[in-house]
Image (cartoon, rainbow, N blue to C red):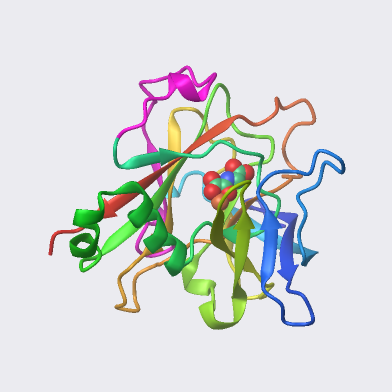
C-alpha cells in the first residue's frame, strides 16, 4: 500500500472441479437472499492504484476503460420510467455484482446485437467492427463507498483467466466471464468519483487485431480508505452498442 495504492479483497472465481459449466442466477433467491451459483469465490488481496490526477493514463483501446469528466444533464434516476431508452441503448438495473467479472463474451455480445437491432440489419452490422461499451457513473454523491475497480486488459491472459459462465434470468440466459486469479492483474480505480464524472468500460470489441483491449474485468470493492460514514454508493450503468462503417 503506497500513497496512491490501496490493498483490498477482490472475489475471484474457482470454477467447479468437475469441469461443469459455470452458472449463476442474476437475482437473489428470496428464501436465502443469495444468488445461487455452482462455483466458489476466492477472496484475494490485490493492490488497486488510485488514478486520481492521472485519469488520462488509460483509454478504452489500451487498458479497456477511460475516465471522462462530464456532468449529467439528467439528474433524477429514481425509476426506470424516468430514464429514456434510446433505440441503440439498453439499461440494466440490478443488484451490485459481487465478484470479478466481464459483462460479455463474444457469443453474448453477438446475441445482444441480434436482440436489440432489426433482423434485416444484423448480418451486415456484424460484418464490421462493433463494440459494447458500458457507461458507469455515480449519481447523487461521490462514490466513496464500494467504488468500482477495473483491471487493465493488458495484464489479463484471456486463455487462462477468463471462464465463460451462464447468467440465468427468470426467463432467459446470458453469458459473462468469471475471472480466475492471476497475480499479474493490475487494478485501477479513481477515488471519490463524483456525479460529474463517468467511466467508459469496454465490455466487448469484435476487433481481432490483437493490440486493442477487448474486455475489462471489474468489480466493486471495499475501499479501506473510504470514510466509515460515507453514504451508500448510488450509480447507474448504460450499455452502448457501437458500430463501425469500415
Ligand atoms: C457493471 C457492474 C458493478 C457495480 O456496471 O457492469 O458490474 O458495482 N457494476 O456497479
Ligand atoms: Fe459488470
Residue 51 vertical placement versus 138 (above, below): below
Residue found at x 61% / y 49%: 169
Residue 23 vertical placement versus 184 (above, below): above
The residue lying toward the viewer, choosing from 61 and 228, is: 61
Query: Which part of the image, by quadrant, shows the C terminus?
Result: bottom left
Q: Answer with left or right where residue 214 lies relative to residue 220.
A: left
Q: Is residue 59 magenta?
A: yes
The residue lying toward the viewer, choosing from 37 and 120, is: 120
Residue 7 vertical placement versus 27 (above, below): below
Residue found at x 52% / y 50%: 51
- Look at the image and give the residue range highlighted in magenta: 57-86
* Residue 9 visible to the viewer: yes
Q: Answer with left or right where residue 184 lies relative to residue 109.
A: right
Residue 92 location in percent, x, y? 51, 39
Residue 159 vertical placement versus 220 (above, below): below
Residue 158 location in percent, x, y? 52, 77
Residue 112 location in percent, x, y? 40, 54
Q: Is residue 87 magenta?
A: no
The residue lying toward the viewer, choosing from 150 and 87, is: 87
Q: Answer with left or right where residue 28 lies relative to residue 26.
A: right
Residue 153 location in percent, x, y? 48, 68
Residue found at x 41% / y 59%: 111
* Residue 58 visible to the viewer: no
Q: Which residue, as the protein is rendered here, is positioned at the far left?
A: 246
Q: Which residue, as the protein is rendered here, is positioned at the far right?
A: 32
Magenta region, mostly helix, strand or loop? loop
Examine the image and state in which quarter residue 72 appears: top left
Examine the image and state in which quarter residue 234 appears: top right
Query: Which part of the image, by quadrant, shows the N terminus?
Result: bottom right
Amino acid at each position: 500500500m503506497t500513497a496512491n495504492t490501496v490493498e483490498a479483497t477482490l472475489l475471484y472465481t474457482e470454477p467447479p472441479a468437475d469441469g461443469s459449466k459455470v452458472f449463476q442466477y442474476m437475482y437473489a433467491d428470496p428464501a436465502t437472499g443469495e444468488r445461487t451459483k455452482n462455483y466458489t469465490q476466492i477472496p484475494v488481496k490485490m493492490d488497486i492504484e488510485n488514478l486520481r490526477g492521472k485519469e488520462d493514463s488509460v483509454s478504452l483501446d489500451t487498458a479497456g476503460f477511460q475516465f471522462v469528466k462530464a456532468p449529467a444533464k439528467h439528474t433524477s434516476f429514481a425509476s426506470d420510467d424516468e430514464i429514456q431508452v434510446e433505440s441503440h441503448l439498453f439499461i440494466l438495473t440490478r443488484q451490485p455484482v459481487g465478484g470479478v467479472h466481464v459483462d460479455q463474451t463474444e457469443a453474448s455480445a453477438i446475441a445482444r446485437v441480434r436482440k436489440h437491432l432489426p433482423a434485416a440489419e444484423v448480418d451486415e452490422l456484424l460484418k464490421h467492427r462493433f463494440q459494447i461499451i458500458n457507461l458507469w457513473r455515480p449519481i447523487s454523491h461521490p462514490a466513496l463507498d464500494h467504488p468500482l475497480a477495473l483491471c487493465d486488459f493488458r495484464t489479463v491472459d484471456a486463455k487462462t483467466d477468463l471462464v465463460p459462465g451462464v447468467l440465468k434470468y427468470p426467463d432467459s440466459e446470458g453469458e459473462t466471464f468469471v475471472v480466475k486469479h492471476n497475480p499479474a492483474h493490475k487494478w485501477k480505480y479513481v477515488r471519490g468519483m463524483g456525479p460529474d464524472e463517468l467511466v467508459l468500460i469496454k465490455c466487448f470489441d469484435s476487433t481481432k487485431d490483437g493490440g486493442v483491449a477487448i474486455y475489462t474485468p471489474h468489480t466493486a470493492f471495499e475501499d479501506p480508505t473510504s470514510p466509515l460514514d460515507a453514504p451508500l454508493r448510488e450509480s447507474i450503468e448504460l450499455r452502448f452498442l457501437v458500430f463501425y462503417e469500415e
